[in-house]
Image (cartoon, rainbow, N blue to C red):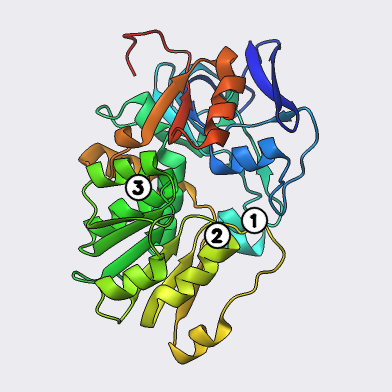
Amino acid sequence: MRRALLIKPGKLEIRKDSLIDPGPGEVRIRIRAAGICGTDLEVFKGNFPAGWNVEFPFQLGHELSGVIDAVGPDVPEAFRTGDRVVADGRIPCWYCSFCRKGLVNACENMGYNAGGFKEYNTYSYRSLVRIPDNVSYRDAAMAEPISCTLYGAEKLDVHVGDFSVVIGEGPIGLLHAQLLKRRGAEVAVIGLLENRLDVARKLGFDHVINARDTDPVEEIRRLTGGYGASQVVTAAGAEEVLRQALMMAGRGAEVLYFAAAMKKSCTLPMDDIHYKELKIIGSYDSTTLYFEKALRALAVGSVQAGPLISHTFRLDEIQEAFDLALSGEGLKIMITDMEEGDED
């Protein structure tokens, strides 16, 4: 079995390991597709998110889909060889206070099973969600980021006719923009990379703004007649983005801080929060329930994943894939070992 390991920041290596049999309550999954996440990129660069214990060599890859190829003992009959599934990599304890509240993404004793960038991995059957028949493996591998955006989006009180802004034109930003548009908002997407903004235009958002050419705060004020946005979602974690979000929000607006700043502190215009009576909302991760919602949303067309997948690489090309992801040239980059014409 081959797997890609991060040997040091910026360097991935393919290694061969023995194939592992599933234990009690586990299944083995043949990985069919896995996406490169923004968090994967941060670790690749040597920036480790709070709470992550990174020791080299390190296994990356948590946005994945695959097919069950072996079933261990004590697995319910609901899961059998040949089933197409997505796996939630979190390993919650199920007994801490947060788990008992259903907030397994805040588990005090959380473990994690990252198995995307390898040929096979074993998972507890409890972490599995079945892929609908009309959803491809590549689209299903987007269930994790879609689940996170759904989890965050449900915290916003969006009404038909609201003016909503998403700052960030990456896959997460374009997923948030799709969900806001679906709920009846007029949606503006702000970004810096023209190739990604072109995808936003093709997806049909109302306003697509290149912040290199236009002051985004002034443009949002102009588009809203000076009132500002009803909702602002930050899908990019730069300190300037967090500041701009407060400045372009209207009176009583909601600001969803979705992307991590990767800094211990930031300088923000705090009086804007006070005088404009803003609601500041944080969102991190999701739960397995939202994986199910994500796959249903894909199945019925509530969100589109295909337009966001710009490149596909083989596992042995993963170094090239990460280098491309760092360049910003692509959008969502997938790792897959499926042959051309294979069912996906």
Query: Residue 269 versus residue 109: which sits nearer the camera?
Result: 269
Tell me if I can see residue 57 in this picture.
yes
Residue at image x 31%, y 32%?
Answer: 306
Q: Amino acid at mark 3?
A: Lys
Residue at image x 30%, y 82%?
Answer: 227
Residue at image x 44%, y 50%?
Answer: 192
Look at mark 3 in the image and give the residue it sits on: 293
Q: CA distance from mark 3 to mark 1?
A: 21 Å
Q: CA distance from mark 3 to mark 2?
A: 16 Å
Look at mark 2 in the image and give the residue it sits on: 103
At label 3, counting other C-alpha atoms closer than 10 Å, the crowd grade (few under 14, some 14-19, many 20 or more) is: some
At label 2, counting other C-alpha atoms closer than 10 Å, the crowd grade (few under 14, some 14-19, many 20 or more) is: some
Q: Amino acid at mark 1?
A: Cys
In x, y percent, where is residue 190?
Answer: 38, 57
**Secondary structure of the residue carrying numbered label 2:** loop
| Circle 1/circle 2 CB separation < 8 Å | yes
